[in-house]
Image (cartoon, rainbow, N blue to C red):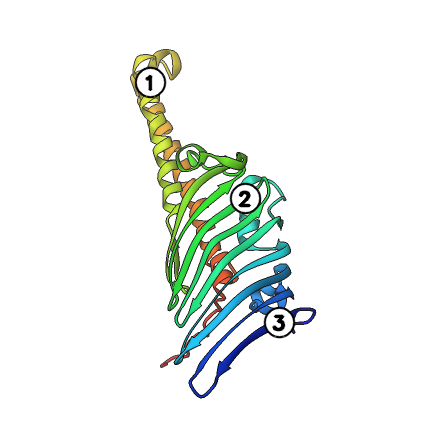
Amino acid sequence: MWGDGKLELTGEGDLERKVFAFEGNATNVPCEQVLNDNWAKRVTGQLSSDFVVESNAGESYAKGKLKVDNAVLTALPVLDALAAYADTRRFRVLDLNEATADWRWKKGEITLENLILSSEGLVRLEGNLVIRDKELDGMFRFGIAPGTLASIPGAETDVFVPGEKGLLWTNVRVTGSADDPKEDLTERLIAAAGLRMFEELPGTRQKVLKFSKALLGDSPEETVLKGVEAIEKGVEVIEKTEGIVREARDILKSEGGLLEGILGGRKKEEKKDGE
């Protein structure tokens, strides 16, 4: 099945009573055979999963563990954005040395536990996600290589902290819906950048007041102008940083973006006038 994939099942059931139970596994399933159109172009690898399925009086559930071997992510908008911010091409084609999750399914709800997506020494995502009638509730630990977000003030000192595997780590909460996912990392990066810039301003102000003639000019008027220019530059940096981070968030949520792809979302058809 699914090209070169293989499916094995064993079990028993009573169709009249709507009771059945079986277990099995799927192996060597090409990712492009089971992913939506957007992700089929961007993800390669072989998916496998063991599973157990049970049903009693019409109430069904399933669970198992999946992994993707030889997983490669290519030409993803979020990877291109990270590559641009980090000034490196390492994110444009990302080899995953680990891609696994425990999963459970019942009508209206999918749960992913112990989810791990890892490119060794570069990025790592660990956590759980519940998709309940398209509503999201997830908590993750997100690790990045030191220096990746050096262009965003405060990101690698106030938001991320050093941890295991030589990475910098932070927690990320995912909420919202499959059509409008939300995460809390963007606002924390913006807040950290703003705080870091304003933390620098008091020290600068004291220097201006104490050493104005030596450092900034020969007159009080020049001192004031220099101080205003320094503050304006700080605000410009904050606004620029906020723009960069918000752009990254928009990329995550855009058509074909990371969150949309994981959840299998598709672009809705535009309504015609009057509909």
Q: Residue at x 30, y 20 (%)?
A: 221
| Horizontal and vertical percent position of residue 42 | 61, 60
Say which mark, if any, is on residue 208: 1
Q: Earlier in the sequence, mark 1 or mark 3?
A: 3
Upstream in sequence: badge 3 or badge 2: 3
Instruction: Identify the element where label 3 is drawn.
Output: strand
Say which quarter of the image contains residue 179: bottom left
Residue 31 at x, y = what percent?
Answer: 62, 64
Q: Residue at x 52, y 78 (%)?
A: 12
Q: Position of residue 151 (x, y in %)?
A: 49, 36
Alpha carbon distance from label 3 to label 2? 34 Å
Amino acid type, mark 1 = Val
Residues packed near mark 3 inside 10 Å, few (<14), some (14 to 19) or many (20 plus): few
Identify the secondary structure beneath mark 2. strand
Nearer to the camera, 4 or 32? 4
* 221 vs 1, nearest the viewer: 1
Q: CA distance from mark 2 to mark 1?
A: 42 Å
Q: Residue at x 31, y 21 (%)?
A: 205
Q: Residues within 10 Å of mark 2 (few under 14, many from 20)?
A: many
Residue 262, image x, y percentages: 50, 61
